[in-house]
Amino acid sequence: MSLLNTLETAALTVRYLSKNWLGPPESPQDDTALRLIVCTGERMETLVNRLYGKVGLHTTTFDPKHSKGLSNEFRCYANFKCDAWEWR
């Protein structure tokens, strides 16, 4: 299975699980809304936005580091704000 197929399968799973999603969290204390975090390579930004854009995903300032020291850039996307990041 290719990386693209894997990401699309994951996206379809998220869409199915979030069918009754009420919208992005209004506050950090809002426990009724779907909270989604996606961490992946920065080159996947277009695909991430296409697959998860409807749930209000934004690029964050959080800078994930790969445990094996991979040199490619990583990004973190989320549909809620918290103390760990801001929107880019």
Image (cartoon, rainbow, N blue to C red):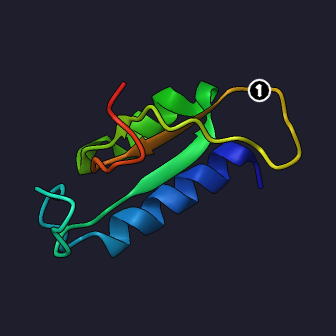
For mark 1, what is the residue?
Answer: 72
Which image quadrant is residue 24 in? Answer: bottom left
Q: Dot 1: what SS?
A: loop
How crowded pointer 1 is (Cα within 10 Å; few <14, some 14-19, many 20+) is rated as: few
Q: Position of residue 16 (x, y in %)?
A: 35, 71
Q: Where is residue 86 in the image (x, y as percent from the top left)?
A: 34, 34
The foreground one among 25 and 27 is: 27
Q: Position of residue 53 (x, y in %)?
A: 31, 41
Please state which amino acid type lies under the numbered disc 1: Asn
The foreground one among 72 and 50 is: 72
In the picture, which quadrant includes the C terminus? top left
Q: Position of residue 81 (x, y in %)?
A: 28, 47
Query: Going 12% across and 66% down the picture, which residue do you hit?
Result: 22
In the picture, which quadrant includes the N terminus? bottom right
Q: Is residue 84 left or right of residue 35?
A: right
Which image quadrant is residue 74 in? Answer: top right
The foreground one among 18 and 67 is: 67
> Residue lying furthest right in this view?
68
Which image quadrant is residue 57 in? Answer: top left
When the figure is inspected, residue 33 is found, relative to residue 78, above or below; the finding is below
Query: Going 35% across and 74% down the picture, which residue do you hit?
Result: 17
Query: Going 82% across and 49% down the picture, which residue do you hit?
Result: 67
